[in-house]
Image: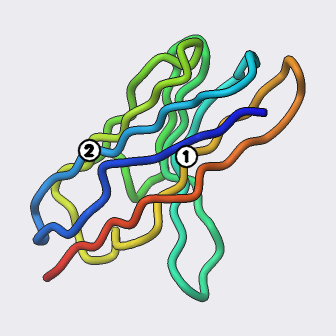
Amino acid sequence: QVRLVESGGGLVQAGGSLTLDCTASGEIVVFNAMSWYRQTPGKARELVATLSSGGRTNYADSAKGRFTISGDVAAYTMHLQMNSLKPEDTALYFCHADAYSPRGLYWGRGTQVTVSS
């Protein structure tokens, strides 16, 4: 059983920065990719950024130019550097992992990011 844990959330003023971290522990499993998602009350969970095991990155349009995903999927670590934060970035941010050996999807419990205007 793999456990994902997020950290780094908090309260920041608009225009400020935060860095989120995700680490995994538990049984050995091979990940295809790790991603950051976010969700606010009443809205569907949305993908923010993805980091593949080969180092390829993808970003949602809302994150491009402001957020940077990094880490080492093979080492079960991932970070999200968030700059120029906006109030609309306020959400619960989740760490997600897609495993292929054994197959499975894993989620952290989330870390809250609140951006004040």
Mark sitting on residue 95:
1
Are the residues flagged by discs 1 and 2 in contact, CB closer than 8 Å? no
Q: Quadrant of the N terminus?
A: top right
- Is 116 placed left or right of 26 in the picture? left
* Distance of label 1 from label 2 (alpha carbons): 13 Å
Q: Quadrant of the C terminus?
A: bottom left
Mark sitting on residue 32:
none
Q: Earlier in the sequence, mark 1 or mark 2?
A: 2
Q: Residue furthest bottom?
A: 42
Q: Nearer the viewer, residue 95 or 61?
A: 95
Name the spot of residue 104 as percent of width and height, x first: 85, 35
Q: Nearer the viewer, residue 98 or 77?
A: 77
Q: Is residue 24 above or below residue 82?
A: above
- Is 113 placed left or right of 91 in the picture? left
Name the spot of residue 2 as percent of width and height, x first: 71, 33
Residue for badge 2: 19
Residue at point 48%, 16% (across, down): 72
Mark 2 residue element: strand
User: Can I make out residue 80 in this image?
Assistant: yes
Amino acid found under the numbered disc labelled 1: Cys
Mark 1 residue element: strand
